[in-house]
Image (tube, rainbow, N blue to C red):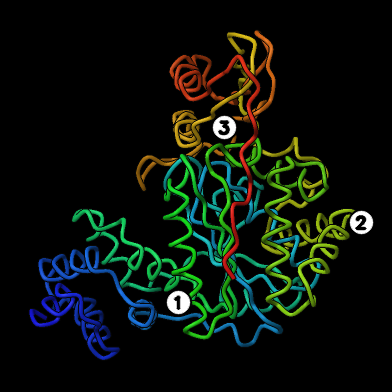
Amino acid sequence: MVDLIEKKRDGQELTKEEIHYIIENYTTGDIPDYQMSAFTMAIYFQGMTDKERAELTMAMVHSGDTIDLSEIEGIKVDKHSTGGVGDTTTLVLGPLVAAVGVPVAKMSGRGLGHTGGTIDKLESVPGFHVEIENKQFIELVNKNKIAVIGQSGNLTPADKSLYALRDVTATVNSIPLIASSIMSKKIAAGADAIVLDVKTGAGAFMKDLKESKELAKAMVDIGNLVGRRTMAVISDMSQPLGFAIGNALEVKEAIDTLSGKGPKDLEELCLTLGSYMVLLAGKAESLEEARTMLVEVMNNGKALQTLKIFLEAQGGDGSVVDQPETLPQAKYVIELEAQEDGYISEIIADAVGTAAMLLGAGRATKESQIDLAVGLVLNKKIGDSVKKGESLVTIHSNYENVDEVKQKLYKSISISGSEVKAPELIYATVE
């Protein structure tokens, strides 16, 4: 291991055998944390070639279980978002692309942060559960084109150990390590093709557009090198996506979006990502054709019906699709009023996310309990005009005194006297 640390420290390329040796022996505990720390720091400074990144990814894939989706008919396309605030895309995309016949076999986790993960959000629907056997999971995808299962316990254990180590050794922000971490999980989960939504801006993991593009390219290259058709969209997270931040509130927003009545930015991003998923699944010849198919199922009600079938197949109460008011409701609905006239110039996404977490919409620690009913609904986005006294945000809370949340929101939302241009939604695509 000392020789391999030296080799990487000096900027040389490691072989497939060397990379697999390191990951295998680190996973079994034969390589200690202090040597692995030195190795990750060497990567941080020296980087990795495309070939090294692909081998590191596959070594992590083979460190644990892999999911076999071969019994599911068709090309399985997975979507991954690098995360953000109010990111309801999975709840919309799953039923939307399933409605045009693309199989969505989704493995999701619980959230640690501003709001719950996809599973927490879906559990806002009474009775919905993800504790299903693999056999039933495959049957549901073949029958309904969509199912969601909880993450397997032994998927990419090398990545889990490595991530925990990087977190305490200042090596998280390394593009080869981030890219291989994300891609190892997607490949182990059995996808044939992968669409990535790489966020950029204040509310994203990658704040800088240049770095976001580098990360997107690194992940796309890894996917294609290991035989998975992969592409990426780089989208804005300088402000929250859509209007809703909070579990049941985001489910309602997904229902609205699938009906064609949702926030325009959320709808546009879902149609863009969905078009790539349909194209990679071989269901359309071009992005234009794919988009037309998606708009059609949104307009004719098929996408909404697919959501209902999916929820009911996993024990959920499908009537919430027709009556979203039966989703968990907060006791208090409080308006945050604008203190001046003007135009919204900034909404700091991660700070707004923290305000939602203060209400109980997210987890500060793994042990935290989530309140599925609470959260925030934005009434204004960047570029919108606002009058003094108008509501900027609707706060859904289960306690009456929300002064701390209000102060946080006032600090997060800036109002300018002159007109402001809304940010671009999609900055680039990497194919």
- Kind of residue indicated by mark 1: Ile
- Local SS, label 3: strand
Query: Which numbered disc flags the more N-terminal residue, 2 or 1?
Result: 1
Nearer-the-camera pick, 73 or 221: 221
Is mark 2 in CB contact (under 8 Å) with mark 3?
no
Nearer-the-camera pick, 431 or 24: 431
Q: How far apart are marks 1 and 3 (CA)?
A: 37 Å
Query: Which numbered disc flags the more N-terminal residue, 2 or 3?
Result: 2
Q: Where is residue 108 in the image (x, y as percent from the top left)?
A: 53, 62
Residue carrying label 1: 222
- Kind of residue indicated by mark 3: Gly
Q: How far apart are marks 2 and 1 (CA)?
A: 38 Å
Residue 300's disc is 2
- Local SS, label 2: loop
Q: Which of marks 2 and 1 is in front?
A: 1
Q: Position of residue 236 (x, y in %)?
A: 57, 46
Nearer-the-camera pick, 400 or 21: 21
Q: Residue at x 65, y 37 (%)?
A: 249
- Kind of residue indicated by mark 2: Asn
Residue occupying the far right of the picture? 300
Q: Which residue is drawn at 38% across and 67% down?
A: 181
